[in-house]
Image: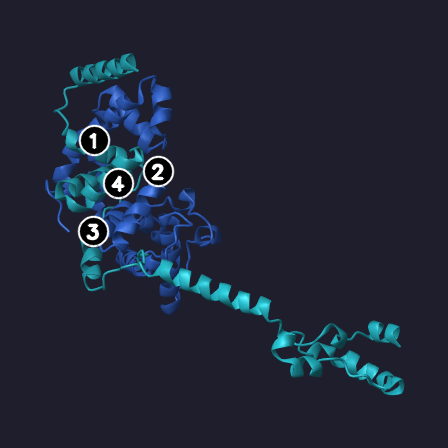
Chain colours: A blue, B cyan
Amino acid sequence: MSDRDIDLQLVERVRQGDQRAFGILVEKYQRKLMRLLSRMVRDQHEVEDIAQEAFIKAYRALPQFRGDAAFYTWLYRIAVNTAKNYLSSRKRSMPTVSDQAMNDDDEPDERLVAQDISTPETELLSKQVAIAVNQAVDALPQELRQAITLREIEGMSYEEIADTMACPIGTVRSRIFRAREAIATKLRPILGTPEDKRW
Amino acid sequence: MRSQEMTEQTMQTLDAIATDLPPADSRFENLSALIDGELADDMAGLGIRQLSQNEAQLARHHEYIAIGDAMRGLNVQHPDFTQRVMAALEKEPVVLAPVAKKSERRPTLWLAAATAAAITWGIWQSNPRDEINPQLAAAQQPAQLPANQSLEAMPYLAAHQDFAQAVISTQEMRFTKASLEIRQ
């Protein structure tokens, strides 16, 4: 099942009353969305507020989501409009945003929203996470490191990775999983994730 | 097929031997594949259900997503953001899309509508409109005007034909300037 189909299934679960399924979508897209918004609004707290408002608007509008576009594309448009409304209500300019990055008819361009923001509040945690993940990836056995890198950074499918690494797809799946587990072990104390999730 | 499975098992065993990593909790292997969109449809449906219902699955999902984002340079962490959104959603009415229900009455309605249409058609066929109301049929016959009056009326009729009710007009009543000229 493709990523887009998974999102559609999650949306369907929300429509059937499963609010937690929406939490999974929030988890999945929050950083991507906030990176986009950080190109439009400088203040970190405002970025979070707008992102939260965008998610809530999306939740309210879910009955109208027809699935013609990918969920993130739809969410992206809601977020951009929310940010525009916010900025116009505050009569602020949008100094760092190019027209292309603001174009709400297109897919977001990763290159245009690649600049991250940081504030003292989040800087330490962000650095800790980055260091922990990098160190954990470096410490992985070569096969696992290659598999997780091809997946997460290059965005390859399991089949493509299997071709590249000359191994069966099942092995790719196992290697990526084992890599994630190994990295998660190092990341858990920093993220403070309990064994059982809350919300 | 069997040899492929053996190769896969062998490679995974060798992987496990070659690494000093602690044994991974295999309960989450499907979740890992689900996040990558690499789980078969039936398994994915089950995985999604488990994910939204199982706290341990949610915790792993949170970590796996954070790992992927960090590797792609999405390092900015927003602690408790999801909790904030979910707390705000608690105040929202539950989103419930109308689910199409199978109506037991629908076939009956269709049957009734079809029967009514068939009866109407039957009556219509056996009793043409002119026979039902001969007076109206007679009234609908084109008036025979003297030639000079018809000529005088031609521009007026041609100009106003668009306002005529075509539904009740007979063939003779549908004027065009050209047809009138020919008829003269």
Residue drawn at (27%, 38%) of the image = B44
State whether residue B129 is above or below residue B42: below
Q: Would residue B88 appear left or right of B97 to someone viewing this image?
A: left
Label 3 close to label 2 by CB (< 8 Å): no
**Residue A135, percent from left and from top:** 21, 30
State whether residue B133 is above or below residue A166: below
Q: Nearer the viewer, residue A115 or A50?
A: A50
Q: Nearer the viewer, mark 4 or mark 3?
A: 4
Locate residue B122: give its quadrant.
bottom right
Mark 3 on the same chain as mark 2: yes
Q: Residues within 10 Å of mark 3 (few under 14, many from 20)?
A: some
Looking at the picture, which amino acid does disc 4 mark?
A: Gly
Label 4 close to label 1 by CB (< 8 Å): no
- Host chain of mark 4: B
Cα distance, mark 2 to mark 1? Answer: 17 Å
Mark 4 on the same chain as mark 3: no
Q: Residue furthest left?
A: A195
State whether residue B73 is above or below residue A41: above
Q: Earlier in the sequence, mark 4 or mark 1?
A: 1
Q: Residues within 10 Å of mark 2 (few under 14, many from 20)?
A: some
Q: Which residue is mark 2?
A: A2
Locate residue A62: give its quadrant.
bottom left
Cα distance, mark 3 to mark 2? Answer: 20 Å
Q: Which residue is mark 3?
A: A20
* Disc 2 element: loop
Q: Which residue is mark 1?
A: B29
Looking at the picture, which amino acid does disc 1 mark?
A: Glu
* Disc 3 element: helix
Residue drawn at (83%, 81%) of the image = B154
Cα distance, mark 2 to mark 4? Answer: 12 Å
